Image (cartoon, rainbow, N blue to C red):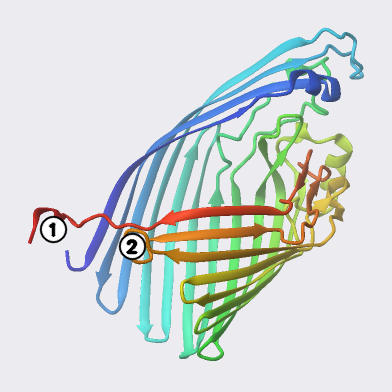
C-alpha cells in the first residue's frame, strides 16, 4: 500500500566448530588432549512492518522466532591421577562428554518515530524477548532515542536502551566435571553454575558538527551497566571460546572522529578511549583457579578485551584511474597478567595500498590492487598467553604483500533480454 511496508522472511543456519588436538603433545604438556565437535542448526521466521501515520508519525513492529538444535561433543584422552592431581600412570584413558541442546527464542517489538518539527526526531518503543533452553528467561525492554538539529551544520543525539543478551548456545558448555575427576584433566573446582543472559542499561550521547564544507567532526560517549555481564575465554588446550558471567559489569568511553574530503583527497582520524570492567564470576567457575576466583570476587577487574586507547587514521588520494591509500592503527595494548592486572605494550601498524582501473571488455571494468600490510615489519604482540580466559599467544601480521584483480560486470536487465 501507499503507507504500509512489510516483509516476512524464513531463514536457516547451520554451523560447526571442530578442534583436533595434538594428542601426544597436548597429553605431555597439559595432561589432556580433547577432540571437540560442536554443531548448531537454526530455523526460524522473522517479520517487520512500518506504517505511516498522521502528524508525522511512523509506527513499526516486528517479530522473530527460531528453534535451535545442537550437539556438544568432547572426546578426551587424559592420565589417571591421585586426589592431589599427581599423575599415577603413563597409559592414557578415554573420557567422553557428549551433550545435546534445544533452544527456542521468541522476540517482538513495537516502535514509534515522531517528527514534531523539522529539528526533532524522537523514537520510542518496547521489545520483548523470551528464551527457553535449560532455563526460561525473558525481558521487557524500553528503548528511547532523540535526534536534534539546533542549526543546520550541527546534529545532537541521545539514547537509552535496556538490553537482553542470551548466551550463544553453541558455545555454552555444561562440562561433565565428574567424568574428569581423578585425572590430569580435572578442573580446579567442581563449581559450574550455568551462564545466564546478560541484562544491561545503555546510555549514549553524541554530536556531529560540519565545521567547513570539507571537514566534519563528531564525538560520541557511552555508558553501559550490566547484570550478569557475558564474557568469553579460551580455557585449556582446546582453544574454543567458553562463555561465563560476571555478576556486574560496567563499560564506558568516548570516541572522536575527524573526516576531511576535498577533491581527490580524503582523510580521517579516529581516536577512542574506553574502560571495561567486571566483578564476581558467577558461572563457569570450573575454568578458573580458586585464587583467581577469590581475587575477582572482591574487586573490579579489567575485561580481557579492555584496551584504553584505540586509534586509526588514513589518507586516500585519487588521480585519474589511480588510487593510493596509507592507513595506520595504534593500540595501547590488551590486558595481561594475573586477573588482567597488567597490560601489553603500545603498538603501531602502517599499511599501504594502490589500485588501478583497467579497461578490458568495457571501460574501467577491471581493477588491479596491490597492498602492503605492516610496512615497517613491526613485531606486534596482541596477547601474551596470560590474563582472564587467555591461554595462548597471538601476534599481528608481519610484513605482508597482497595482490588481486577485481572484475566489475552487470547482468542484462530482463527487459533487455526480451527486447523493447
Residue situated in front as seen by the camera: 8 or 239: 239
Residue 415: which numbered mark, if any? 1
Residue situated in front as seen by the camera: 356 or 67: 356
Query: Residue 313 sits in which quadrant?
Result: bottom right
Query: Residue 330 sits in which quadrant?
Result: bottom right
**At which x and y percent is residue 338?**
88, 46
**At which x and y percent is residue 148?**
48, 83
**74 w.r.t. 315: above or below:** above
Quick one: label 2, few (<14), some, or many (20+) residues within 10 Å?
some
- View extreme (left): residue: 420
Q: Residue at x 50, y 28 (%)?
A: 70
Query: Residue 19 sits in which quadrant?
Result: top right
Q: Secondary structure at mark 2?
A: strand
Say which quadrant the N terminus sits in.
bottom left
Quick one: label 1, few (<14), some, or many (20+) residues within 10 Å?
few
**186 w.r.t. 65: above or below:** above
Tell me which numbered mark, 1 or 2, is placed earlier along the sequence: 2
Residue 60: which numbered mark, if any? 2
Any part of residue 185 in sight: no
Amino acid at each position: 500500500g501507499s503507507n504500509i511496508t512489510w516483509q516476512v522472511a524464513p531463514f536457516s543456519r547451520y554451523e560447526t566448530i571442530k578442534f583436533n588436538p595434538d594428542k601426544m603433545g597436548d597429553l605431555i604438556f597439559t595432561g589432556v588432549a580433547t577432540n571437540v565437535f560442536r554443531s548448531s542448526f537454526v530455523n526460524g521466521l522473522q517479520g517487520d512492518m512500518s506504517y505511516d501515520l498522521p502528524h508525522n508519525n511512523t509506527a513499526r513492529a516486528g517479530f522473530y522466532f527460531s528453534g535451535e538444535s545442537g550437539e556438544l561433543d568432547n572426546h578426551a584422552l587424559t592420565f589417571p591421577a591421585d586426589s592431589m592431581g599427581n599423575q599415577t600412570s603413563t597409559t592414557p584413558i578415554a573420557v567422553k562428554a557428549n551433550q545435546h541442546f534445544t533452544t527456542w527464542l521468541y522476540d517482538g517489538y513495537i516502535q514509534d518515530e515522531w517528527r514534531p518539527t523539522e529539528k526533532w526526531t524522537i523514537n520510542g518503543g518496547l521489545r520483548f524477548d523470551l528464551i527457553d533452553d535449560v532455563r526460561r528467561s525473558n525481558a521487557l525492554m524500553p528503548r528511547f532515542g532523540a535526534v536534534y538539529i539546533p542549526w543546520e551544520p550541527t546534529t545532537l543525539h541521545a539514547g537509552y536502551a535496556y538490553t537482553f543478551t542470551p548466551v550463544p548456545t553453541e558455545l555454552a558448555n555444561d562440562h561433565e566435571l565428574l567424568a574428569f575427576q581423578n585425572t590430569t584433566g580435572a578442573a580446579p573446582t567442581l563449581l559450574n553454575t550455568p551462564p545466564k543472559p546478560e541484562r544491561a542499561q545503555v546510555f549514549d550521547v553524541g554530536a556531529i558538527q560540519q565545521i567547513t564544507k570539507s571537514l566534519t567532526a563528531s564525538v560520541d560517549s557511552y555508558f553501559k551497566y550490566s547484570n550478569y555481564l557475558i564474557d568469553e575465554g579460551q580455557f585449556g588446550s582446546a582453544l574454543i571460546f567458553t562463555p561465563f558471567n560476571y555478576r556486574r559489569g560496567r563499560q564506558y568511553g568516548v570516541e572522536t572522529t575527524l573526516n576531511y574530503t576535498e577533491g581527490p583527497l580524503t582523510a580521517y582520524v579516529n581516536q577512542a578511549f574506553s574502560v571495561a570492567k567486571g566483578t564476581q564470576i558467577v558461572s563457569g567457575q570450573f575454568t578458573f583457579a580458586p585464587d583467581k576466583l577469590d581475587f575477582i570476587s572482591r574487586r573490579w577487574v579489567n575485561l580481557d578485551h579492555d584496551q584504553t586507547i584505540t586509534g586509526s587514521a588514513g589518507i586516500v588520494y585519487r588521480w585519474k584511474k589511480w588510487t593510493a591509500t596509507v592507513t595506520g592503527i595504534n593500540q595501547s595494548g590488551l590486558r595481561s597478567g594475573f586477573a588482567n592486572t597488567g597490560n601489553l605494550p603500545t603498538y603501531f601498524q602502517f599499511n599501504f595500498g594502490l589500485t588501478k582501473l583497467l579497461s578490458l571488455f568495457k571501460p574501467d571494468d577491471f581493477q588491479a590492487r596491490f597492498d602492503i600490510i605492516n610496512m615497517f615489519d613491526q613485531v606486534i604482540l596482541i596477547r601474551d598467553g596470560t590474563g582472564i580466559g587467555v591461554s595462548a599467544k597471538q601476534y599481528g601480521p608481519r610484513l605482508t604483500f597482497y595482490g588481486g584483480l577485481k572484475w566489475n560486470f552487470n547482468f542484462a536487465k530482463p527487459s533487455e533480454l526480451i527486447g523493447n
